[in-house]
Image: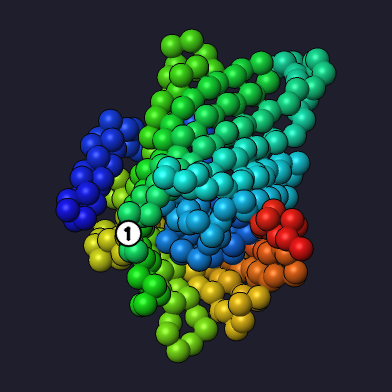
Amino acid sequence: MKATKILTFFLILLSLSSFSQIGGSGIYSFLNLPNSARIMAMGGTVNAIKDNDLTLAWHNPSLLTENMNNNLALNFVDYFSDINYGNFSYAKKFEKLGMFNAGIEFVNYGRFTEADITGQTYGEFTAADYQFKLGWGRQLDSSFSIGANLNNIYSHLETYSSYGLSVDVAGTYFSRKKQFCTSLLFLNMGRQLKTYTDGNSEPLPFEIQLGLSKKLGHAPFRFSIVARHLEKWDLTYSDPFHPEPTVDALTGELLPEKKFGKFADKAMRHIIVGAELIPSKNFSLRFGYNYQRRQELKVDSKVSTVGFCWGFGFRVKKFNFSYGRATYHLNGSPNHISVITNLSDFSKK
């Protein structure tokens, strides 16, 4: 009976994904921004660590547990230029219904000067995106859990605005004895209900993710691997202004096609790896590597640490603090700060 419920749940996920847009582009791309310092420090996507971290349940509601009851999480990112974004979420347990998580995410793109093609200015305007999320998670038994998010999306860019609705669904298997966790996620399944301009409906950034994590039994390490965009194999981008050479510049002969190299490159663009060093329950160091980010944003003359991420987390009394930093390109690295606390701790005597 248990196996039948699990199989039915994943069949529902597959049927929902068949109605979604499949592609490498879409509106509301802010939905996939790293929403916590821990996630940013471990490569930008972490979806299969079940240790009562409310920020991980933002994208994966099947990670919600009863231990998160009355937890509050706050996140803020000093992004590039004048852009900043953040979110807050709160988790609450309801008997017989499961765990619920509600929160708001914002992206503030700053202020812009309004001008026409002649350079004549007409003042300033603003741009921002918002997401209002309601999540639900339920434990089926000691190992399996499921969850879903309902996302209300609003975007305001100068005089243009758009509204969309989407859902995320997820399932997780967790073995406490082996300290192994794996999750399957179907993200951003929905549609644009109000378009920026009439008759120009655009797809949401639908995505399928598969993640796993393993904590070593006799060493303070946890490793995480996430496979992203399983709905699309080829994530490479061919720059029309810098085409890949097909002829040797010296001999004029055709260059041999590197089939295995291309296959490995396409496969690795789906993979994000992360690791945590946990010497104590109150402190951890985090590292991550995002291959796709490195390939797309590196400068060949100086690749530096593009694609690498790092951070740390620590607990002080009633608060869990996390810091994450990711190198997107040589121009700079965003700083991400997260704080989690349980409001019930403040009412205990």
Image coordinates of residue 85 in percent, x first then y, are 67, 43
* Residue type of the residue flagged with mark 1: Asp
Q: Is residue 287 left or right of residue 118?
A: left
Give the residue at the far front of this rendering: 349
Q: Identify the residue at horizontal 48%, vertical 56% (top origin).
A: 65
Q: Identify the residue at horizontal 49%, vertical 34% (top origin).
A: 151
Dividing the image into 4 quarters, which one contains the C terminus?
bottom right
Q: Identify the residue at horizontal 61%, vertical 17% (top origin).
A: 160
Residue 201, compared with residue 234, is above or below; it is above
Residue 280 occupies quadrant = bottom right
Instruction: Examine the rendering and report whether any part of residue 191 can be seen.
Output: yes
Image coordinates of residue 80 in percent, x first then y, are 70, 47
Give the residue at the far bottom of this rendering: 218
Comparing 341 with 299, the one in front is 341
Comparing 125 with 341, the one in front is 341
Q: Is residue 312 left or right of residue 298?
A: right
Q: Identify the residue at horizontal 43%, vertical 43% (top origin).
A: 97
Image coordinates of residue 173 in percent, x first then y, are 33, 61
Comparing 274 with 236, the one in front is 274
Image coordinates of residue 295 in percent, x first then y, are 47, 58
Instruction: Examine the rendering and report whether any part of residue 337 can be seen.
Output: no
